Image (cartoon, rainbow, N blue to C red):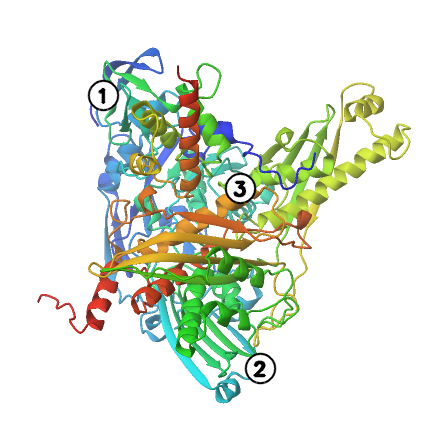
Amino acid sequence: MNQIGRSIPRLEARAKVTGRAEYVHNMRVPGMLYGKIFRSTVAHGCILSIDTSAARETEGVYAVVTGEDIRSVIPNPYFGPAFHDQPILALEKVHFVGEPVAVVLSHDPHIAEAAVQMIAADYEELPPVFDEVEAMTSDAIVHEVLKPAGTFADLKHLAGRKHTNVTLDYQLRRGDVEAGFAAADHIFEHMFRTGQVLHVPLESHASLAEPGYDSLIIHTSSQTPSFVRMEIARLLGWPENRVSVRVPFLGGGFGAKVYVKVEALAAALALIARRPVKIALTMEEQFYTIGKHATTFRIKSGVTKDGHIIARACDVWWNGGAYADIGPRVAQKSGFTAAGPYDIEHVRIDSTEVYTNRPPAGALRGFGVPQLVWAYESHTDLIARELGIDPIEFRRKNILRDGRPHATGTIMKDAAIGKVLDHLAERMNWNAPFDRGIGKIKRGRGIGIGFKASISPTTSGAIVNVNADGSTVLYTNTIDMGQGSDTGMAQIVAEVLNVAAESVKVVHGNTDVAPYDMGTLGSRSTFHMGNAVRLAAEDARNKLAALATEVGLPTGTNYDVKELFKKRYGMQAGNVIGTGTYIPRYASPDPKTGQSDNVTPFWMVGGTGVEVEVDTETGHVRVTRMINVADAGKPINPKICVTQLSGGAIMQLGFTLYEDMVFDSGQVTNASFADYKIPGFRDVPPMESDLVTATQETGPFGAKGVGESSTFGVSPAIANAIHDAVGIRLTELPIKPETLLRALRAAEGRPIEDEE
Amino acid sequence: MSEARTIRFTLNGRPVSVAVEPHRNLVELLHDQGLFGARESCGQGLCGCCTVLVDDVAVSGCLYLAVGVEGKNITTVEHLDSGGALSPVQQAFIEAGAFQCGFCTPGFVLMTHQLLAHNPDPSEDDIRHYLSGNLCRCAAYPEIIEAVRLAARRQKRGSP
């Protein structure tokens, strides 16, 4: 049976509906201690003292650990994928409200929690900086010295820099943007902003570290087990084989669980206590752990009178928060797509990430692209309106088609931008008359399309084991966090080995047995790991064929695998092991111009169209229809792909209309589900999600990633639809009823007067 | 911390007697019994991940003190397939692909059981209203609606 293109249920479906699926959340081991964290109450300050005496004296407390204590097992306890800037527990300074400062260990989490309340710290407060544009020139410097990790070539020049908050100053130059503006008939310039939001997977971060005699096992809710092993080994000065990282299922990830989050803390505590230690964050603590960049984006376009964009200048500032995490990669990888999926001759992009005294920002579903699409698709819509050109027609005139160079110089290939746009227009019935609403309810519609590059340089490895009874096992460090990777990978193995996908066992997330993988992130697994799995399965198939020849079967005969092993070993014994490693071709962009002839292994394309109702008396916006369209190549499991599309779009709907981290002097004031509202059943609009017919030639069986594609267009589609309905342009996310109502009233000439 | 008290209750059809401290919640009590299907997530009774049936009524286990189950009949998601087969609701969730990460799924499954017990033929609006206390960050909401309808149709056909 053809295993590719089958919408089979997830392999782990029964375990999930019966509540028996394994998460780190569930794990307990004998002798385990719980760690509870004491956190900073100031946004920026020098630590003068930490008084842990009362906590230590509490009955049932095993130990209280501070940053200095961590040095007994890890002398240089700074970690991070881009910069070695984040201490396991604060040392000398604190950089944001909520930063971990000390930990109480106890066999009883309630005792640990109560004892945390007895710790007191004194700080000498320093001036903080919170805004990404102010941080460019502020006297408040978050880190005294920049410490790039050495992993990324384009960060090396920042090593040792002082008196700056800049963590990456990416630039792209194509053509001559000023000459382009001079030649244009119209110039448009706008500024857009997004607030800080966060992932909030329902399973908060959890790590359980078990010390052995000369080894350490870390069970963790991580999207990147290989990186965790490498980074913990580096911190400890151990070879990687003494650290074992194991990951069961994740209760959601969305980028919150990439690289090191609480793993280093759990590891250090376990070595200090010589007992297993579990750190399981609460929902509130997620707000102090990782979020998505707040951004400011100034975009300027030069357009000819017949509606061709000939020049575009983009200045993007990314609010990285107090630690770099993977933020500099966001500023670069997404930064080079800031001019949008358009064919523009002259492009300038400056994409700058800065430290501020907010909780750190990192990777969140789309890796910066949704913030960019928010700006360039709002901008595009404004241009089309101003020129009196239909917004779909305007895009059609300007989109990047296969064979044309992207702003980086890379020739576009297998990016179905035109198809996505056309499909969207068709599903929205764009050319049919549209009901504009009556009375106080006004109706409008809008679209947004975007694209994203995949990650590189990067490597994935996989092992396929065929047992002597013919059953197969796949070993992979791709983590199933809900996106259905176990199922998709099993389908690839099954296709190659001609077995049923349901019969393939997937062993995921175990660095002792599965090969290196860069991480489950950036919609890379289907493509990168999928290719590695395909190679491993083909290797196993070839070895089985060689075995058949060895035992004297004529080439090309159908054989029973079980009989093959019996013939070879004289009984049911032995295995065939296939291995596969995939490294896509990639050319690192020129540091001055951002030019590269191969900047990405593949492109993701997604678009969203919405119809909205605006209540002009309250400023409330209701999305009455949402259509998401994406290019996923040839889908391996179409049903799971479509679920990814609707899920991603609903998440982005939350970031568009409801979600916003609210700060008061650096303190998040809405760090709970009572005040930070994620979309629930009542918020989900009627929606349709579709894949266009496409093929990614370099992908496994024509497939590519899809986990982020539906997040691209949602926010600008909604803002464009609001503009269409009531003529008001909103430039800041999230779109709050209050902002819209104020704008509506101001436009009517009766602004809302604030009470003194 | 306060003294533990011994309580007796029925858990998934079996009598249980345990000592529990008064500040512990029902989710912790269940975890001590090796049942992890009810999960504390938001800790405020707002997400539904910790849903447990107490005398056949769904409660938020994270807000329900363990000592409160004294003499009561507790059902968790682990009990639904105790006969060896999945419940029609569980089966429908699988067929409709009504989950991704699965962390919130036990809560949705239990609430759907309760919904269909009260309202065997719910409209889409009924479903959205009844399940609005359960959150799914993966946002498998469209598929959950499909699953509830599928389960309702089967339940109707199966009933006398």
- Camera-nearest residue between A431 and A466: A431
Marker disc for residue B36: none
Marker disc for residue A175: 2
Assign a secondary structure to mark 3.
helix
- Camera-nearest residue between A372 and A160: A372
Within 10 angstroms of label 1, few (less than 14), some, or many (20 or more) residues? many
Q: Chain of mark 1?
A: B
Q: Position of residue A588 (x, y in %)?
A: 62, 67
Q: Amino acid at mark 1?
A: Val
Separation of residues labelled 2 and 1 (CA atoms): 72 Å
Q: Amino acid at mark 2?
A: Gly
Can residue A167 be seen here? Answer: no
Question: Of marks 3 and 2, which one's residue comes earlier in the chain?
Answer: 2
Query: The C terminus of chain A is located in which quarter?
Result: bottom left
- Camera-nearest residue between A434 and A518: A434
Can residue A526 be seen here? Answer: yes
Q: Nearer the viewer, mark 3 or mark 2?
A: 3
Q: Position of residue A372 (x, y in %)?
A: 44, 65
- Quick check: A294 above or below A183? above
Marker disc for residue B67: 1
Q: Nearer the viewer, mark 2 or mark 1?
A: 2
Assign a secondary structure to mark 2.
loop
Q: Are marks 1 and 3 on the same chain?
A: no
Q: Quadrant of residue A557?
A: top right
Q: Quadrant of residue B104?
A: top left
Query: The N terminus of chain A is located in which quarter?
Result: top right
Assign a secondary structure to mark 1.
helix
Q: Disc 1 vs disc 3: Cβ atoms closer than 8 Å?
A: no
For disc 3, the marked residue is A640
Q: Nearer the viewer, mark 1 or mark 3?
A: 3
